[in-house]
Image: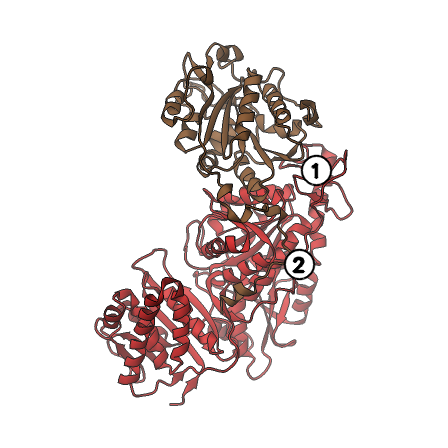
């Protein structure tokens, strides 16, 4: 399929110039390059600007609750392992309301890709501070400057044993597309934290601000099979900010442990002739 | 004294960690294998070692529905058990206790005392003090003059996976207790158990029965977080997931549990979660999502005592209103209230049908008492309820087809496609949505969608289990109840109606939708007494709002303990005097 075959039935209503447009474009390019049929993809989102994503794309979708796309995605994947499951959500979804689910998904290693649109703000609710807002930033809910250090999504994922951890940049569509294709090919949970300029509520971390700072891990000799090196890189956040694949390994996914779905996905299993006679005997 | 055969209230008590539960189930099983009926009820604190556990078994040669007062045979594994339970003994009871460590104190000569060196035998033969429960069970079988071979067969099955040596050690320990009693106590205990020659039945708890129903109904997915009293659902289903081909997930919290279950249901499998009140409180947000997205889901909510952490290992019917109104906005849900192990099986199966047919969340509201008490019952008829999946589409679409997940229809039910079928994308949203499943906050659309969703409940009424009248058709008083009070009410009816028709019992089985006409008709024709295991008579309010009628009398109990049939008999006699 071509990227335009994934164009949704509604037009995106993000702010003009929003970084989300680039992420949407990168995803469609990746789907096309991976030759995924739109009927085999399931795009699961939370609530927020980023989480409107499934409305703008023509694939199976489930627009869930704020913070909850990860568990919904996990359930869908276990029920039908043939589905190609992608989560699209924001930093509030993933690192705020859904932090517990995020950490647990890293540990359990469910086989899906999470693309987290990280604009460091709660934008849909008009720009409050988010878990990733830089220290000192003034917003409507941090009038005197944020005092809590921001969450470090990459370091968190690495410490929770995530098997694929990457960071993308909305200002580099081709690089992001490549990350999505690599994440998709990975068996197990893949995190792509995407630095996403918010043109309305984030006047600090702008497209230009990022462009001056980012560099690519794959061009810097980083060994992505070295977790400790990846953790070191995850704490670089100053005049140099790395993007690319921090870490990946081949540990088994949650679904691969399930013998009961090895041959036939749960959803394809016949339920009309289940016998419980033997089970009842065991209670006698 | 006249011998009382096959009518025994039995109790074993001791420190938590001494295998009270497993020995209680073993006793229930040996009774059942001799063709006897049992009901058992367990009390325990929220800790693993050191607290007091008590396991009550009522045995009869006809169906027995609940625990009863007046314990006829007490097995005391420690001194504390005697102190705690001596006031529950019938005047002619027997006590089996450890002869070397328990100072029995003064008892009336009518009480038969059976001092047995339980710990000594446990240590000598079983090489472990913990085996004293097995020694005691052997002694008990001798005291009531029952069949040792039945006990040996249950022990054998229980330990068969652990090797012959373990099996033999256990049988020998039981045998030592049995032989000691036979040798040292020549006077016959007047409560006796005899095999009836009738076939054996199953010994299941409400949770066990529900699991069997869920498996038969094709439940493919359970996500749940541990919590008393649903743990045995989680444990049993986990133990059977590979044998029966379904998946059980224990996630990080109850919020994840219900969302994972919803995700699995969206992808097309029969899916469920379970919890008690505290865990369900965390699920409330996602319940609304199941409602607005019309995602089928079965939820078992089993109540315990009080608000918040409350009385975690005790029982109460305090959550009915909570389930009826949980989550913001208005959306349809079905609430079924199983009252015994058979209901747990059949309503469990039905719940999965209703959830898919009407595309909504379906609750089974239970409590610790019905979840964990065992009752003997014959094998369930697993052909009684056919699997109905409603308007489920699991075939590929046609090229160019435009699938509308929420298409308006006369019934309000839209065809539900699973994602992953060719030429079709399934779009679902927790926002108010269009027929396509895309965000739509238009006024007209919202009204139509509300009418579509809420209208499904009217249809569901015909499929929801109807209230059931037990006992004589005509009686002086009709007892109304829901859920687990069924057990003591049915047991009370046995006594109340022994000579003439005094009382019958109307069991409300479906709270939402509510069979107003049937209930109103019964209330018109008889004086009514509503019995609830809560402080605010929650069902009474439901009856009033649905029928504009109020039961004549109310009997509530909210000490977090179940009703006893004797109390109900007394209450009824007081009312109809």
Query: Where does the image place residue B438, in percent across and percent down from the top left?
Result: 68, 33
- Give the red chain's letter: B
Residue B94 in picture, x, y percent from top left: 33, 79
Residue nearest the viewer, comparing B443 with B274: B274
| Structural crowding at the residue carrying mark 1, measured as other residues with C-alpha within 10 Å and reported as few (<14), some (14–19) or many (≥20) | some
Identify the secondary structure beneath mark 1: loop
Instruction: Please rate how many residues cluster around mark 2, counting C-alpha atoms within 10 Å: few if below 14, some from 14 to 19, many from 20.
Output: many
> Quick one: label 1 or label 2, which is nearer the N terminus?
1
Residue B477, percent from left and from top: 60, 73
Residue B422 badge: 1
**Residue B398, numbered circle:** none
The lab-note entry on whether marks 1 and 2 share a chain reads yes
**In front: B72, or B259?**
B259
* Image height of B178 relative to A249, above or below: below
Q: Quadrant of residue B399?
A: top right
Separation (CA) of disc 1 from disc 2: 35 Å
The subunit carrying tag 1 is B
Chain letter for the part of the structure drawn in brown: A
Percent position of residue B183, x then y: 28, 84
Left or right, residue A154 beside residue A172: left
- Is residue A255 visible in this depiction of the protein? yes
Residue B340 seen in this snapshot: no
What residue did someone put label 2 on? B464
């Amino acid at each position: 399929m071509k990227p335009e075959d994934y164009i949704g039935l509604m037009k995106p209503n993000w702010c003009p110039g929003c970084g989300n447009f680039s992420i949407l474009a990168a995803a469609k390019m990746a789907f096309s390059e991976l030759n995924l049929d739109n009927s085999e993809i399931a795009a699961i989102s939370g609530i927020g600007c980023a989480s409107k994503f499934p409305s703008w794309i023509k694939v199976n979708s489930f627009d869930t609750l704020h913070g909850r796309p990860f568990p919904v995605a996990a359930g869908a994947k276990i029920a039908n392992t043939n589905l190609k499951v992608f989560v699209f959500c924001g930093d509030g979804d993933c690192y705020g309301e859904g932090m517990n689910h995020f950490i647990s998904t890293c540990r359990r290693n469910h086989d899906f890709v999470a693309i987290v649109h990280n604009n460091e703000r709660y934008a849909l609710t008009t720009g409050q501070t988010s878990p990733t807002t830089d220290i000192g930033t003034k917003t409507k809910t941090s009038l005197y400057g944020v005092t809590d250090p921001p969450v470090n999504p990459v370091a968190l994922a690495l410490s929770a044993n995530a098997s694929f951890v990457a960071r993308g940049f909305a200002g580099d569509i081709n690089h992001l597309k490549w990350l999505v294709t690599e994440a998709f090919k990975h068996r197990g949970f893949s995190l792509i934290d995407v630095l996403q300029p918010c043109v309305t509520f984030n006047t600090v971390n702008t497209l230009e601000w990022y462009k001056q700072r980012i560099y690519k891990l794959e061009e810097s000799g980083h060994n992505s099979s070295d977790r400790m090196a990846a953790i070191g890189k995850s704490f670089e956040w100053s005049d140099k900010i790395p993007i690319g694949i921090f870490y990946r390994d081949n540990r088994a996914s949650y679904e691969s442990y399930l013998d009961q779905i090895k041959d036939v996905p749960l959803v394809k299993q016949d339920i009309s002739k289940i016998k419980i006679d033997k089970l009842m005997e065991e209670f006698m | 004294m006249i011998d009382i055969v096959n009518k025994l209230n039995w109790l074993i008590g001791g420190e938590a960690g001494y295998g009270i539960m497993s020995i209680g189930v073993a006793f229930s099983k040996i009774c059942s294998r001799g063709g006897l009926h049992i009901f058992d009820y367990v009390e325990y604190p929220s800790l693993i070692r050191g607290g007091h556990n008590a396991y009550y078994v009522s045995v009869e040669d006809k169906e027995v529905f609940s625990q009863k007062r007046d314990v006829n045979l007490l097995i005391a594994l420690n001194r504390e058990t005697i102190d705690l339970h001596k006031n529950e003994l019938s005047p002619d009871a027997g006590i089996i206790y450890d002869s070397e460590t328990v100072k029995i104190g003064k008892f009336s000569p009518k009480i038969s005392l059976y001092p047995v060196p339980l710990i000594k035998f446990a240590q000598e033969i079983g090489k472990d003090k913990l085996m004293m429960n097995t020694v005691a069970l052997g002694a008990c079988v001798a005291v009531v003059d029952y069949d040792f071979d039945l006990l040996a067969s249950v022990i054998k099955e229980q330990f068969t996976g652990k090797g012959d040596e373990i099996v033999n050690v256990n049988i020998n320990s039981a045998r030592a207790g049995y032989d000691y009693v036979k040798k040292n106590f020549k006077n016959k205990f007047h409560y006796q158990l005899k095999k009836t020659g009738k076939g054996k039945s199953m010994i299941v708890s409400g949770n066990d029965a529900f699991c069997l129903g869920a498996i038969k109904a094709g439940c493919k997915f359970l996500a749940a977080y541990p919590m008393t009293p649903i743990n045995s659902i989680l444990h049993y289903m986990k133990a059977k997931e590979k044998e029966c081909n379904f998946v059980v997930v224990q996630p990080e919290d109850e919020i994840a549990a219900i969302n994972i279950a919803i995700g699995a249901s969206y992808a097309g499998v029969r899916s469920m979660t379970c919890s008690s009140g505290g865990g369900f409180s965390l699920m409330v947000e996602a319940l609304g999502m199941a409602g607005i997205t019309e995602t089928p889901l079965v939820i078992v909510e089993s109540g315990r005592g009080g608000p918040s952490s409350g009385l975690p290992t005790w029982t109460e019917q305090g959550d009915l209103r909570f389930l009826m109104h949980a989550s913001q906005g208005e959306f349809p849900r079905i609430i079924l209230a199983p009252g015994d192990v058979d209901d747990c099986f059949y309503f469990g199966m039905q719940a999965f049908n209703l959830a898919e047919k009407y595309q909504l969340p379906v609750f089974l509201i239970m409590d610790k008492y019905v979840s964990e008490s065992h009752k003997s019952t014959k094998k369930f008829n697993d052909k009684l309820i056919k699997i109905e999946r409603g308007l489920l589409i699991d075939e590929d679409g046609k090229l160019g087809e435009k699938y509308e997940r929420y298409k308006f229809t006369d019934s309000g039910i839209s065809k539900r496609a699973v994602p992953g079928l060719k030429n079709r994308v399934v779009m679902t949203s927790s926002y108010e949505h269009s027929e396509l499943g895309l965000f739509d906050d238009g006024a007209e659309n919202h009204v139509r969608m509300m009418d579509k969703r809420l209208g499904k409940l009217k249809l569901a009424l015909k499929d929801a289990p109807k209230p059931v009248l037990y006992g004589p058709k005509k009686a002086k008083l009709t007892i109304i109840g829901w859920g687990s009070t069924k057990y003591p009410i049915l047991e009370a009816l046995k006594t109340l109606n022994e000579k003439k028709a005094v009382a019958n019992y109307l069991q409300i089985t479906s709270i939402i939708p509510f069979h107003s006409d049937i209930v109103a008709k019964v209330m018109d024709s008889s004086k009514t007494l509503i019995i609830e295991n809560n402080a605010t008579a929650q069902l009474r309010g439901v009856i009033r709002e649905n029928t504009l009628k109020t039961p004549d009398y109310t009997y509530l109990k909210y000490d977090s303990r179940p009703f006893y049939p004797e109390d109900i008999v007394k209450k009824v006699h007081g009312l109809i005097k």
